[in-house]
Amino acid sequence: MIVFLCFSMRVLQEYPDPDSIGSTVNNAKGLDLFINIYSVSMRRLYRLCLSHALFLLISLFLGFAATTVSPATEKEILLQFKGNISNDPYNSLADWAPSSNPCNYNGVFCNPLGFVERIVLWNTSLSGVLSPALTGLRSLRILTLFGNQFTGNIPQEYAELSTLWKINLSSNALSGSIPEFIGDLQSIRFLDLSRNGYTGEIPFALFKFCYKTKFVSFSHNSLSGSIPASIANCTNLEGFDFSFNNLSGQLPSGICDVPVLEYMSLRRNVLTGSVLEEISNCQRLSFLDLGSNMFTGFAPFGILGLQNLSYFNLSHNGFQGGIPEVSTCSESLKFFDASSNELDGEIPLGITNCKSLEFIDLGFNRLNGSIPVGIANLERLLVFKLGNNSIKGTIPREFGSIEWLLLLDLHNLNLAGEIPKDISNCRFLRELDVSGNALDGEIPNTLDNLTSLEVLDLHRNQLDGGIPETLGSLSNLKLLDLSQNNLSGTIPSSLGKLSNLTFFNVSSNNLSGPIPSIPKIQAFGAAAFS
């Protein structure tokens, strides 16, 4: 308004109305005098208006500035954060001094305008509570404090940090309920509160405005209740990890309607129900871990053909039925664990098409048939576990062509025949367990090629012949169990060289002769030889 009046005065000063002037003054001198007086008055009034307008603009500017935190004030805020630290064992905040530029503080990063944008202090073992003062950092985008020992909870004042897009407070000692106000922070992309002491339920309102959220982790807490159906609101969610909690109920409907979902980990909860229909809709998954829950029904083996799938874990559930033929398999699939379920039928031959597999565990099911010979085509295989099933046949000699094999577990099956000498070609093998079968013949004397072997369990078979002297060359061996066989002859003194042995048993055989007078061997007591 003042500016408008000043503009009006300026117009009147420069363009006076001659008719109104003429009607008041009847001679030229009077007219000149009036115009001079009029001009001076208008100039003074104009300057007065300008001064008032300038004063108003300055006041508005100062009022705006008063709502903006200065870098000096941000220093005070950071020093308040430091004041809440009770222990700094690595002196991570030693350079947080009043005389220093806060942008040069360790773990503090500023934007080009000099305002704090990131606080990154990870694995520094800081103890204390989170300072509510951080809410004054109006440009803060990233708060990363994982790997410390903060206690308490996230201050309610952090609800005002609308600029935050990454919060990582994992691996601390935070407790209480997950703050519901986090759901009001509409810029959040990454939220990790894993490995803390949070209890209670995951708030439904947490996923109220999660349209920008890409990853959420609450793993390794003590959360209970169900997974909020509102998580389906997170249309840009790429992954979530709620593993190692006490979550119950079923997998929420619509979770796989999230078009970009790639990572889902729900391991070690008490979730129930069928997942086949819901998981089958997850067409972009690369990581699925449903292990150690109480899921039932048919397992979602259909997603094994997804292009990007690399990790598939359904272990320790109540899944039933067979493993269908795998016509196509992801070239990225490395980990396949369906152990400890109620699966039946044969191992599909198509599993050998999964050329990138490094880990296979189908143990503790009701599988029958034989071991597919084509397993040898899995040249990258590191672990193969099939124990506790009803598999028959023999141990395929082709296992010997899997150069990088580290663990072979075929215990408690119905295998017969001999232990193939080709196994000795697996020079990186660390564990060989073929116990609880009907294997016969002699123990291969070439097993000393397995110089990395730590576990050799051959007990409860029908092996005969003597104990090979060459076993004494397995210097890394920690467990040697040859009990419950038909072995004969004496106990080789070479076994005394096995300095790393922690378990030794050759009982229930037909061995003869004295027990070697070697302290390492005799220390296992009479039960190991009877």
Image (cartoon, rainbow, N blue to C red):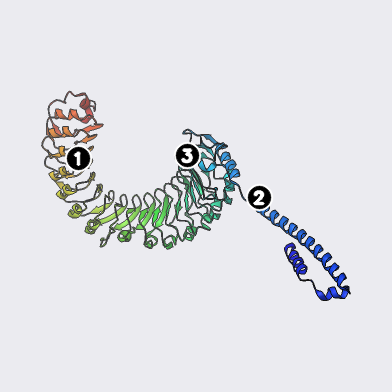
Mark closer to the chain start, 3 or 2: 2
The x and y percentages for residue 441 are 11, 42
Q: Which residue is mark 1?
A: 460
The answer to whether residue 358 is above or below residue 14 is above
Residue at 31% x, 49% y is: 340
Mark 1 residue type: Arg
Disc 1, SS: loop
The x and y percentages for residue 111 are 52, 49
Q: Residue 290 or 45: which is nearer the viewer?
A: 45
Mark closer to the chain start, 1 or 2: 2
**Number of on-image labels:** 3
Q: Which residue is mark 3?
A: 148
In-image side of 24 versus 154 (left or right): right
Q: Quadrant of residue 420?
A: top left
Q: Please give the label number shown on residue 254.
A: none
* Comparing labels 3 and 2, the label whose residue is closer to the camera: 2
Q: Residue 309 or 16: which is nearer the viewer?
A: 16
Mark closer to the chain start, 3 or 1: 3
* Comparing labels 1 and 2, the label whose residue is closer to the camera: 2
Q: Which residue is mark 2?
A: 66
Residue at 79% x, 64% y is: 42
Disc 3/disc 1 C-alpha distance (Å): 49 Å
Q: Residue 109 or 476: which is nearer the viewer?
A: 109
Mark 2 residue type: Ala
